[in-house]
Image (spheres, grey):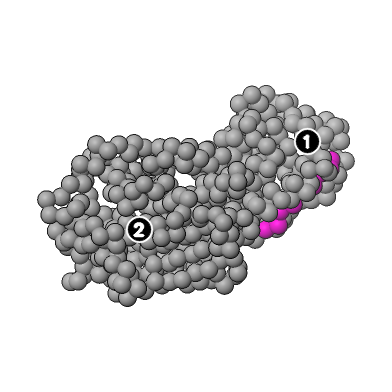
Amino acid sequence: MEYAAKSGNPEKQRVACVIVGVFDYRRLSEAAEALDKASGGVISAVLRRGDLDGKANQTLLLHNLPHTLCDRVLLVGCGKEREFDGVRYREVLRTALKALRQCSARDGFSYLASLPVRGHDLGWKLRETVLASEALAYRFRAAKDDEGRDARLRSLTMGVDSRRTLEEAENHLRTAEAIAAGTLMARHLGNLPPNVCTPTYLAEQALALAAADPAVTAKILETADMEALGMGALLSVARGSRQPPKLIVLEYGADRDETRPIALVGKGVTFDSGGISLKPGAAMDEMKFDMCGAASVLGTFKAVSQMKLPIHLVGIVPASENLPDGNASKPGDIVTSMAGKTIEILNTDAEGRLLLCDALTYARRYEPEVIIDIATLTGACVIALGHHASGLYSNDATLAKALLAAGEATGDRAWQMPLWPEYQKALDSNFADMANVGGREGGSITAACFLWRFVEDQRWAHLDIAGTAWKSGKDKGATGRPVPLLVEYLMQQVARA
């Protein structure tokens, strides 16, 4: 879909639908007042009849408003003006855009970005509009014989207050389109069936990113390469699968060799049965989403590439299936990681950390400024935080604060969890340097403690996205999180440089 910014009076916009806000109680926004005045008070008269009073997320569609050039006017309730913050703005945006799509308009002109939102500027409002619009337009059509992506709405223009801000607004829109493209890529990869989205398929997507942009390079390490590196933990996960594992290595902006890179490491288990420690059958189909950490790394690279962000970025994706087989790892097996540390596998369903520990060790070769790993790692994180926030663990307060701020700015929020040394004792093993699980209590924390052992003094953060990477039920599907958080963090680092 096409997005643009334009200044001008709402009554003069020759479009299928103009969107304006109404605050509680029947207080017209500036754009709504302009339409009301041009139409001779039609909007005020409608509101006095009680059809809409401005409560949050109400909508009312008016046709053929006198003395205006648009076909329709969509009134959107915004609630109390003093409570109109970022959360409310997102709610109102989503409500307005859903109503716009339902009215069969082919183009729209929204004045919602001109509403004052406490603590947020025009750029933020424009980005949120594009992201909400693209999220609503997305349809998974790879295996469905239907119309796929909603094709009725072709363009959306955002009204800005002054011609002087048009160039800045257009730049914000292009940034938003890039973030949306990366988020939708992550969603689509997560939604693909596991017989399509295999480790090899993920590797092909990485190679396609590199082919599309000379600033991106990709290399794929095969089983023999990983054996030569001593990645016994990663390879132990793949032993039960007929699909060959891959270690995908992406690099963006390598010519910026004066800067140490930021490394993103994403868990890429393209299907997780639990292995010998088999999961329950109910909802096991959702274990195709266990590669959403990998998808978020690929999506972030797509966004950064499209934005041409001046940054040095490394992405590492350990990709494998986790299946039961005569050759699969067994509870009680001991494997040796790339770091030379031995691991007693007490539960084969705690496989993500086995992939990640070798990938984290490999990432240290790049001497990165920071390492951020992203993984649908533990059900325990879902129990702790539900589906609203990703779990954040870090050994660096500055890094944690920056990631939390990026999450708040984008609505892709995280919550910091403890990473105290006392939790490490749960990983003690009588037979190896460590066990791969630490019991039921604090399961998300002990998983993070396991990963911490492989980064040592490296600045590092771990995002457990098990509760945020996908939705279940009638809205089942990948969310694309935490691509918005990651891209916002990277943009912040560029701005501070």
x then y, percent, for residue 41? 83, 30
In this view, the residue in front, 254 or 20, is 254
Q: At 56% from the left edge and 35% from the top edge, which residue is drawn?
A: 87
- Direction left: furthest residue: 430
Whichever of callouts 2 and 1 sits on the residue coming sooner in the sequence is 1
Residue 15 tag number:
none
Q: Which residue is mark 1?
A: 31
Q: CA distance from mark 2 to mark 1?
A: 56 Å
Q: At 23% from the left edge and 62% from the top edge, which residue is drawn?
A: 336
> Which corner quadrant holds the N terminus?
bottom right
300 vs 472, left or right, is right
230 vs 425, left or right, is right
- Direction front: furthest residue: 258
Residues tagged 2 and 1 counted as in contact (Cβ below 8 A) = no
Residue 9 visible somewhere in the drawing: yes
Asked where in the image residue 31 lies, by quadrant, the reply is top right
The residue under label 1 is which amino acid type? Ala
Q: Is label 2 or label 1 in front?
A: 2
x then y, percent, for residue 438? 21, 46
Would you call the spot at circle 2 few (<14 residues within 10 Å), some (14-19), or many (20 or more)? some
Q: Main secondary structure of the magenta part?
A: strand
Q: Which residue is mark 2?
A: 361
User: Element at badge 1?
Assistant: helix
What is the magenta range? 1-10
